[in-house]
Image (spheres, grey):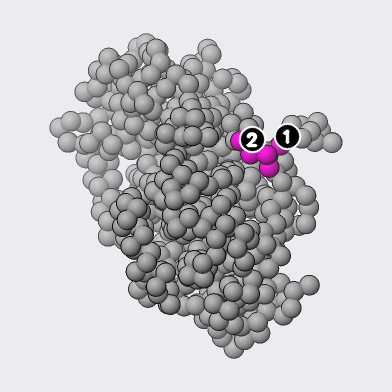
Amino acid sequence: MRKAGKIQPLPEAIATLVQDGCFVALEGFTHLIPFAAGHELLRQGRQDLTVVRLTPDVLFDQMIGLGRVERVVFSYGGNPGVGSLHRFRDAVEHGWPRPIEVREHSHAGLANAYVAGASHLPFAVLRGYAGTDLPEHNDDIAFIDCPFTGQRLSAVRAINPDVAIIHAQQADRQGNVQLWGLSGVQKEAVLAARHAIVTVEEIVDELSAKPRAIVFPAWVLDAVCHVPNGSWPSYAADFSVRDNAFYEEWDGIARDRDRFRQWMDDNVLSASAPVGPAVAAS
Amino acid sequence: MSELDATPEEVMTIAASRELDDGEVVLVGVGPPNAAANLARRLDAPGCVLIYESGAIGARPQRLPLSIGDDDLAAAAQDLVSVPEMFNYWIGGGRIDVGFLGASQIDSAGNINTTVIGDYDAPKVRLPGAGGAPEIAASAGRVIVMLRHSPRSFVSEVDFVTSVGRELDGTDGTGSVVITDLGVLRPSPGDGQLELVAVHPGVDVDQVREATGWPLRVREPLQTTAPVTERELSELRALRVSADER
């Protein structure tokens, strides 16, 4: 059982809980992507990682482009509404800066792999994948017959990362966390992982109940870190808006290997604070 | 429609928007389907229920969202659900009337590829991958696919089956349709193979043949898409402006 969630600086949480070669989930579906924590992991030099996200997004493009990722588990590797993730493509197509292993699912498959992981079951069942070429390239997908109806269904192997890292809006001083808005697979990722780190926009004396919120009791978390704007250029509902202009700008930055490296040096690797402007919630 | 100077992309979007009936429950994919579904909601299908796989049910975006998880999209939604719930209860549970998808490649059986161009293990182009498409294509009542018409995208055999064409099984998928910048294709009632049923105004059937990587079948009598109206075009352009102002 985890110790009670504890408020601590992000560098300390990453240094304690993430080692080279770890299996790390960094979740947040468009909303609440834990960029600042991912960047801290890069600054600390973590490498040979297996990383999982439904939507790799710009964050994994950055991690892959710096050569820190050995294997990526995902279900949609694009820059939503913009186009390609160029660093991800370069790694898969040309092995630059290193070849990466790709393990890919559909959203339904990967989401259910987390559900199984959170339930401590070996696999999950869904109606999906039939007729597609995905199972042929991923050993974590199989087909089974329903024991009651004989119906042919697909099964996905459970995912249990070493560490799940997410960003949320609010924590109290005991380390209980509240997250609201689009909640993606964060609950499943945290409960599927052996350890969990949450960065939050604000720390308050008492959580104020929000509609459609999910709450993580402190005792299911290992570290809670105060990192305002920690999901930029993604967003935190009621704190910031998605920086769509940056997502479009990233297309140009990531197209070019040198420009990418320079940008990472200037904005992530040499910086101690999260990049990006503090955006006021509209 | 040429008198209104609509671009081929705009013609495609407007033609696709007309496919939605008012009140239908629509799962909206990223990219061109997003514009078409939001246009339909502003024109003749104001009662459409827009669902985004990010978890937004009954979304009513004021601006055209760039991603499928934009803040504006979530803010005005009727409900927000987790991704496992979205796929298990809403999509897998069969509550979607129309799946509205994009594609990089399509074949005559309606199979869609959004995964790789070339060999999977050494791809020429690594595309984004499946996202929600395989289960949306399999579970929705019917599917609308939008893509630009070219020999590179309309291929005799897709390099990778990301989502399975529904037409061949002959059970459902009857209302499924492929909308391009040149015309409209529907599955043949006979064997389910896609056939051209309409060309957009000013498009010649030979043009469509040249842009199709398999021997194109044409359903006679070939229709011509109704011209774009001033209202449709101005609403679409207003949507685009709203996207630029985000």
| B201 w.r.t. A270: above or below | above
Tell me if residue A54 is in the magenta stretch: no
From the top left corner, tell me how far across and down residue A181 is, in percent.
Answer: 53, 65
Would residue B37 be seen by someone viewing this image from the given angle?
no
- On screen, residue A213 versus residue B58, left or right, reads right
From the top left corner, tell me how far across and down residue A106 is, in percent.
Answer: 58, 43
Q: At label 1, which amino acid type do we have?
A: Phe
Q: At label 2, which amino acid type do we have?
A: Pro
Q: Residue at x 27, y 18 (%)?
A: B207
Q: Which mark is residue A143?
A: 1
- Mark 2 on the same chain as mark 1: yes
From the top left corner, tell me how far across and down residue A38 is, in percent.
Answer: 51, 66
| B93 w.r.t. B15: above or below | below
CB contact under 8 Å: marks 2 and 1: yes
**Picture quadrant where residue B229 is located:** top left
Would residue A87 be seen by someone viewing this image from the given angle?
yes
Q: Quick one: A32 or A137, which is closer to the camera?
A: A137
Chain under disc 1:
A
Location of the N terminus of chain A (image quadrant): bottom right
| A35 w.r.t. B232: above or below | below
Q: Which mark is residue A135?
A: 2
- Which residue lies most toward the right here? A148
Alpha carbon distance from label 2 to label 1:
9 Å
- Sequence-wise, which precedes: disc 2 or disc 1? 2
Chain under disc 2:
A
Location of the C terminus of chain A (image quadrant): bottom left
Q: Residue at x 41, y 69 (%)?
A: A268
- On screen, residue A109 versus residue A148, left or right, reads left
Identify the magenta region.
A137-143
Q: Residue at x 42, y 77 (%)?
A: A273
Callout 2 secondary element = helix
Q: Quick one: B202 or A32, which is closer to the camera?
A: A32
